[in-house]
Image (tube, rainbow, N blue to C red):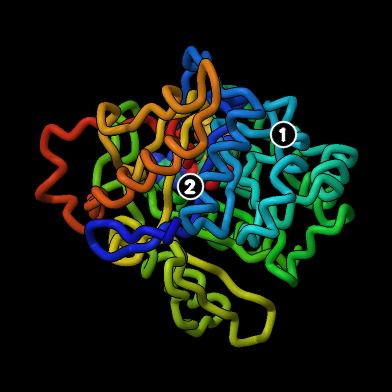
Amino acid sequence: MASPTDGLGRPLGVLRLSLTARCNLACPYCLPDGQEPPGLLSLEQRVVVVQAAVALGAHSLRLTGGEPLLHPQLEHLIEAVQPLRAQGLREIALTSNGTLLNASRARALREAGLDRITLSLDGADATSVARMAGLSDPRAGARTLEAVLAAIGHARDAGFDPAAGALKLNAVIQRGRNDDQLLPLAELCRRQGLELRLIEYMDVGNRNGWSPTDVVSASAMAERISSRWPLEPLERDLHSTARRWRYRDGSGGIAVVASVSQPFCGDCNRLRVTADGVAYTCLFAAPSSGLDLKPWLQPSINAVGLEQALTQLWHSRRDRYSEDRQASAAGHEHAEMAYLGG
Ligand code: SAM
Ligand code: SF4
């Protein structure tokens, strides 16, 4: 089947597959559900979904959640999709808060065939980490920070090389909550040789009480860091969510994800599938706009029907919420981030 383009001429390139809606943290800007939705997909059903997305042109698979390391079959899934590399799958990546990434898990992920890990950490001291991760006690913040720093080492030791882009750090920045962490986080990443990916706080979900005044723009974040360690911009790669900058002193670089201040809907190539098998074509989608894929996955698998349904979904896609935020925001219900797979 030929790769479809959507209603705005955009091809499918990335499948973000959420493995669980649950998390062991409760970051107030995300606020995941305490329980899974009913009807979680099985491993076999997930492989069929990935296969269909690859047949439609997806070359990159990002495993996410919720916290994907809570999923006991994560490594099995990574192993099971390896044959799809022969059909066009080029990269398998994971986004994780890192708190459960011990040495043996990092090795198992690498051995299973995972290419890249992005860890999330929103502060470089115990108090900031506790605040951003929804932990009431700074001692819990210290333990979380320690676990994520250890996870960086475990991932590196397992072969996820930051110099090759295989290990990066995400941080969401909220005005008045952790914008004082910009320089400490940049310093931590410079020391560790990691690319720091700074994400503008987004209006995903309905629970976080998002307000535009809480957003620190990507350009303000880059400027703040550049005033301490001068930066120069690099070209944004087509279809990338991030704009990259490099340090003039040669110590790596940062990336900024400006989905609020400089939306990149124009070349967005991402399809999202939730842990219970509902497909969404935009991060800011309304809960009711998802397409439930289960009719093609159970009681028996109908791979041809699934490909046709996804092709039709992609053909009818016209989402450009972030570019149209002002016009579309009023009364707009959003699906929650941890459910959608951020
Ligand atoms: N639990 C994993 C983690 O934290 O990396 C994976 C799922 S999490 C939803 C994926 C990414 O989305 C994280 O880097 C997180 O910081 C980011 N995120 C969550 N809510 C956000 C929001 N409202 N605005 C911007 N980024 C957000
Ligand atoms: Fe959990 Fe990630 Fe959401 Fe934080 S951002 S609550 S770590 S899913």
Where residue 27 sits: x, y (%)? 50, 32
Q: Does residue 211 lie above or below 8 as drawn?
A: above
In this rendering, would 90 be left or right of 134? right
Residue displayed at 40% across by 36% down:
279
Q: Is residue 187 visible?
A: yes
Residue displayed at 56% across by 59% down:
59
Kind of residue at badge 1: Leu
Q: Which mark is residue 74?
A: 1
Locate the N terminus by quadrant: bottom left
Q: Is residue 191 visible?
A: no
- Mark 2, mark 1: which one is toward the viewer? 1
Where residue 341 sits: x, y (%)? 48, 38
Kind of residue at badge 2: Asn
Residue displayed at 12% across by 32% down:
331
Q: Which mark is residue 178?
A: 2
Q: CA distance from mark 2 to mark 1?
A: 31 Å
Q: Does residue 158 lie above or below 161 as drawn?
A: above
Label 1: how many Cα within 10 Å (few below 14, some 14–19, many 20+)? some
Camera-nearest residue between 240 and 273? 273
Where residue 3 sits: x, y (%)? 42, 60
Residue displayed at 70% across by 34% down:
144
In this rendering, would 281 be left or right of 61? left
In this rendering, would 38 be left or right of 67? left
Q: Is mark 1 within 8 Å of ligand 1?
A: no
Q: Does residue 35 lie above or below 315 as drawn?
A: above
Camera-nearest residue between 51 and 204? 51
Camera-nearest residue between 219 and 74? 74
Where residue 267 sits: x, y (%)? 34, 66
